[in-house]
Amino acid sequence: MEGTSTRPGSSSDTTDHDLGEFVVTPPHRELLDQVLDKWSLAVCNELCERPSRFNELRRAVPAVTQKSLSATLRRLERNGIVERRVLSSRPVAVEYRMTPLGKTLRDPVEVLLAWADAHLPQIERARARFDAEPDNS
């Protein structure tokens, strides 16, 4: 179909309002689930400011459990978003920091958050309408 692409921006006929279909493959879904999960954005937000040790992150994200924070950091490290550095100190300490790849997440996340800010009133109205329907309770 003319003017439609399988990848946003891959066709010269594509406009800002006609980006075509999204192609979300299992690897995309897995990565997005891991990077946009409950704790990852909060952890990345803290690490974008400065490198932090584990307990500093726990204090900065107080609702996260030790187990969840550890799992989140391991997932982010596995995906190349965060790096773990062992510091040569006594006692030995570990510091986490964003990788150059991880820092590239900032712009798309800011765009998504700006979209949410701009559309939150509409979303809240849609939720209220949906929740008011007897079939949806």
Image: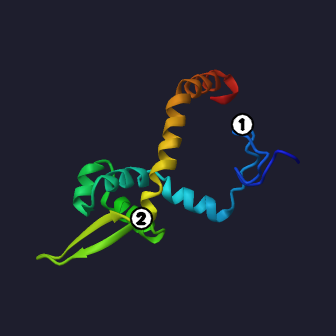
Query: Which x, y percent locates residue 135?
Result: 70, 27
Residue underneath mark 2: 100
First of labels 1, 2 by sequence position = 1
Badge 2 marks a residue whose secondary structure is helix
Q: Locate residue 14, reporting x and y percent.
A: 76, 45
Left or right position of 53 against 119:
left
In the image, what residue type sits under mark 2? Pro
Q: Is residue 52 left or right of residue 34?
A: left
What residue sits 26% from the left and 67% below the top?
95
> Vertically, is 73 above or below 61?
below
Along the line of sight, the residue nearer the viewer: 95 or 17: 17
Residue type, numbered disc 1: His
Q: Nearer the viewer, residue 108 or 121?
A: 108
Residue located at (53% from left, 42% from top): 112
Q: What element does badge 1 sit on?
A: loop
**Badge 2, how many Cα within 10 Å: few under 14, some, many 20+?**
few
Residue beneath the point at 41% across and 53% down = 39
Q: How is the image coloured?
A: rainbow
Residue drawn at x 36%, y 50% is 45
Nearer-the-camera pick, 95 or 106 = 106
Compared to residue 113, the image places residue 79 above or below, namely below
Quarter in which the C terminus is drawn: top right
| 91 in relation to 106, above or below | below
Q: 97 or 39: nearer the eye?
A: 97
Q: Quadrant of residue 47?
A: bottom left
The residues tagged by marks 1 and 2 sit, at their Cα atoms, a distance apart of: 31 Å
Mark 1: few/some/many CA within 10 Å (<14, 14-19, 20+)? few
Residue linked to disc 1: 17
Residue 28 location in percent, x, y? 62, 61
Task: Give coordinates of residue 48: x percent, y percent.
Answer: 34, 54
Horizontally, is 129 left or right of 21 in the view? left
